[in-house]
Image (cartoon, rainbow, N blue to C red):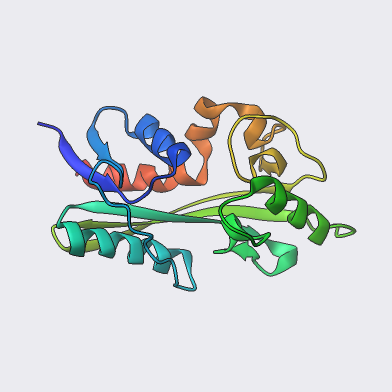
Amino acid sequence: MKKNLVFATNNAHKLEEIRAILGDKINILSLNDIDCHADIPETADTLEGNARLKAEYIYQNYGMDCFADDTGLEVEALNGAPGIYSARYAGGAGHDSEANMRKLLSELEGKTNRKAQFRTAICLIEGGEEHLFEGIVHGTILQERRGTAGFGYDPIFQPEGYTETFAEMGNEEKNKISHRARAVQKLVEYLNQ
């Protein structure tokens, strides 16, 4: 029988990405699947801390093995910003990717250092034990959007060693090299031990 594991998210893009990466090894349940509709606080000042808060919430309230992630885009010239604020960088309610990209491009105007990295931290709680995994992709912030696939900052992020942005790659290729894929790979290796 396949193991059930809760992924503490309702983000359809993330769920799809994780299910594609894990294939049919593990049955991934979303917050909706376990009837969790709480707005789990992300009040930590690190990606690891936010992932831990979400995983602990599910484990304590639902008693199920689970994992949570937090991802940030860290731009060198902006001292690591937007970082933990990546999804809400432009302010306002929800995740407005267009507004976030506009703000980032405007902050980088005139700057020659456009180095950035996407970083994902995953916290797994299994049988009460906590494990952390990290995935990083280095790259560059372009001056204009390219591509229509993906989500978030994908149209302006070009990973190191590639000529395409994440948004030009298509999900299959992106899922092989993304920060989330790298963190999930470490999670999968651990779960398969």
Farthest-out residue, left: 1
Q: Percent position (x, y) of residue 36?
A: 27, 51
Q: Quadrant of the C terminus?
A: top left
Res 85 → quadrant: bottom right
Res 162 → quadrant: top right
Q: Is residue 45 above or below residue 13?
A: below
Q: Percent position (x, y) of residue 110?
A: 90, 59
Q: Percent position (x, y) of residue 6?
A: 25, 47
Q: Residue at x 23, y 35 (%)?
A: 26
Q: Residue at x 72, y 43 (%)?
A: 156
Tell which of 115 and 120 is nearer to you. 120
Any part of residue 108 in sight: no
Q: Percent position (x, y) of residue 150?
A: 58, 34
Tell which of 32 and 6 is nearer to you. 32
Q: Residue at x 68, y 44 (%)?
A: 157
Q: Quadrant of the N terminus?
A: top left
Tell which of 47 and 98 is nearer to you. 98
Question: Number of numbered discs present?
Answer: 0
Q: Is residue 149 left or right of residue 177?
A: right
Q: Is residue 65 left or right of residue 135?
A: left
